[in-house]
Image: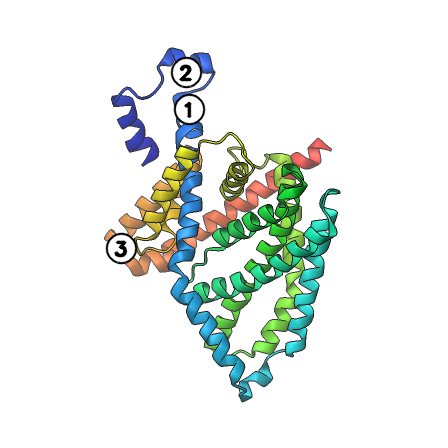
Amino acid sequence: TCYWILAPMLSARGLLPGAGQLAEMGTSVTNYLRLSLFRPLGIGMLVGGALAGIVLALPLILGAIRSMQTASKLKTEASKDEMPIRLLYMAVAGAFLVMLALGILSTPEMTLGRGILMAVLGTLWVWMAGVILSECIGRTNWSPLSGMTLIGITILIFVSSGIGDRAAVVAAVMVGAAMCVAMSQATDLMLDLKTGYLVGATPRAQQIGQFLGTWLGPILVMVLIFVLHKAYGLGSDALPAPQGQALASVIQSIVGGDVPLDKYLAGAGLGALLSSSGIGGLGVLVGLGFYLPFSIVLTYSIGTVLRLLSDWKRGVSFSENVGVPIAAGLIVGEALVGVGNAVVKVVQGF
């Protein structure tokens, strides 16, 4: 859409700089379009689509609250298969202490009072957002995690705004990162419990397994992110990090940075409209198409066309049973090769 439709339309109407102007700016027409138009619109669509997903999930939110109220009044034999409730209370206390430590230690300007307030709000938001995300993933296999994280960090920035913009952003992002991990873990656990319920697994055994394996994932991810950043650089064309860029743009808007608000707002409105179409996450998906580099979008487009041709010629069953596993293998293989190349670059750099 960006490069095949919008770009030719803008060129035909004379809305793009000429070759001489582009040469003076030291850029190409593709880079100019992406940096000055498509990327800001894409960031706005990511934010607007995520927030619209939360609004559309309100019926699920109310249903989750009613389910919790009903479950608290019932005590059945199935409750014996759950882990003791006191462990939940201990986990809540532990989450509060971790967020308090992150908030206070992240920047020397942070006061104890603001740190406690951030930890309290962060713990409450993890609980509420975890319920919402779990309900969404259980019913639709899609959850507005990015939107929930964005709202949580925005709240924390306002809470810590009295200590200076830079310190407030650092503290909010540190605590917000912990909140995001907690919410994503809750979503993953609930999806596993849903699968376990369908196959007759014991919730207690699943919960123990999740707790034992939870610590491994973040460690591996942090190591991989460090390696990839050293090799390619987060935010580059090789690693665009669209959600991170969207969050950074929102933070810049909050603290009064020089950002193209008109494009962000237009993208947010378009993303919200697309997410309201009934197709879960459509605004976010289209926003990614606007934000990501052309080389990545092109490969996605080729894959989509191949899927449509496969459905038409060989049938949906063939696409799902043969095409999808092959495509999944391509994704995994490309990721492994990329990580391997990154490791080699980092080792050679040392």
Q: Is 341 placed left or right of 2 in the picture?
A: right
The span from disc 3 to disc 2 (Cα, nearest Å) is: 47 Å
Which secondary structure lies at badge 3?
A: loop
Which residue in the protein does label 1 denote? Answer: 32
Question: Which amino acid does the dot numbered 2 rest on?
Answer: Leu
Residue assigned mark 2: 22
Residue 135 coordinates in the image, percent (x, y): 46, 67
| Image quadrant in which you'd find residue 294 | top left
Q: Position of residue 214 (x, y in %)?
A: 64, 62
* x and y percentages locating residue 164 in the rendered image: 66, 38
Q: Which callout, 1 or 3, points at the residue further toward the start of the chain? A: 1
| Figure colour scheme | rainbow
Q: Give the class, few, some or many, for how many residues have Cα within 10 Å of label 1's Cα (few <14, many ≥20).
A: some
Residue at the spot of label 3: 314
Tell me which amino acid carries mark 3. Answer: Arg
Q: Quadrant of residue 180?
A: bottom right
Please report the residue visible at 34 percent of the width from the left and 43 percent of the height from the top: 270
Q: In the structure shown, which secondary structural element does the residue marked by tag 1 occupy?
A: helix
Q: Is residue 248 above or below residue 17?
A: below
Of circles 1 and 3, which is in front? Answer: 1
